[in-house]
Image (spheres, rainbow, N blue to C red):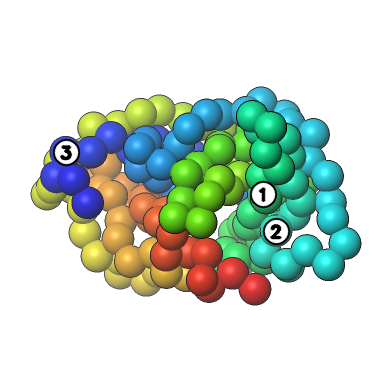
């Protein structure tokens, strides 16, 4: 990770997360998401983005936390972040994209208790710890 990279602070199902801005191509407001039969449990459906069908993560199947509110994020789908991964585009549903933060090397720490599979680092901002969502590490853990 770059020592002074920018991160997007987002809320997904009532949980605050960060994601490197370099991974986010666009924020799509309320896209039409189409469920597909036999889709992986970790995906909620697909939506159209620049002539491609992009799968959308089904976060409550991935984040095993009792504080995760399915009704807020995964049903309403106020926004979907279109993210670039090693495997192609992936959609990340969120209820809000709060702000862009400049982060310096001393603001990154190892996770004390990982909330998200495959995510091992947190960002410390104003004395709060936020998991850094590493989608490339997350995808192999998706059911």
Relative placement, left or right, of 56 versus 121 is right
Residue at figure coordinates x 45%, y 36% from the top left: 24
| Viewer can see residue 12 | no
Residue 66 occupies quadrant: bottom right
Dividing the picture into quadrants, the one containing residue 121 is bottom left
Residue 106 lies, with reference to residue 26, above or below; the image says below
Residue, far front:
51
Circle on res. 66:
none
First-in-chain label (1 vs 3): 3
Q: Which residue is drawn at 42% across and 65% down?
A: 137
As measured in the structure, the alpha-carbon distance from the residue carrying label 2 to the one carrying label 3 is: 32 Å
Secondary structure beneath disc 1? strand
Quadrant in the picture for the C terminus: bottom right
Is 114 placed above or below 105 here?
below
Residue at which label 2 appears: 43
- Which residue is rendered at x = 48% and y = 32% of the image? 25
Q: Which of marks 1 and 2 is nearer the N terminus?
A: 2
Number of other residues with Cα within 10 Å of mark 2, as a class: few under 14, some 14 to 19, many 20 or more: many
Left/right of residue 138 with respect to residue 90 in the rendered view? left
Whether residue 6 can be seen here:
yes
Q: Distance between the residues labelled 1 and 2?
A: 5 Å
- Asked if the residues shown at circle 1 and circle 2 are in contact, with their CB atoms under 8 angstroms apart, the answer is yes
Describe residue 48's horizontal placement relative to residue 140 as left or right.
right
The residue wearing badge 3 is 4
Q: Mark 1 points at which residue?
A: 56
| Vertical side of 76 occupied by 55: above or below | below
How dense is the environment of label 3, judged by Cα within 10 Å: few (below 14), some, or many (20 and up)? few
């Amino acid at each position: 990770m770059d020592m002074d990279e920018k991160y997007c602070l987002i809320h997904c199902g009532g949980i605050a997360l960060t994601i490197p801005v370099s991974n986010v191509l666009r924020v799509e407001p309320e896209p039409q998401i189409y469920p597909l039969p036999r889709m992986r449990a970790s995906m909620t459906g697909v939506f159209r983005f620049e002539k491609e069908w992009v799968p959308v993560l089904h976060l409550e199947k991935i984040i095993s936390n009792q504080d995760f509110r399915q009704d807020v994020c995964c049903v309403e789908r106020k926004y979907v972040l279109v993210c670039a991964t090693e495997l192609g585009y992936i959609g990340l549903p969120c209820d809000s994209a709060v702000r862009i933060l400049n982060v310096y090397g001393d603001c990154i720490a190892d996770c004390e208790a990982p909330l998200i599979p495959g995510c091992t680092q947190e960002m410390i901002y104003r004395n709060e710890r936020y998991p850094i969502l590493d989608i490339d590490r997350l995808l192999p853990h998706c059911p």
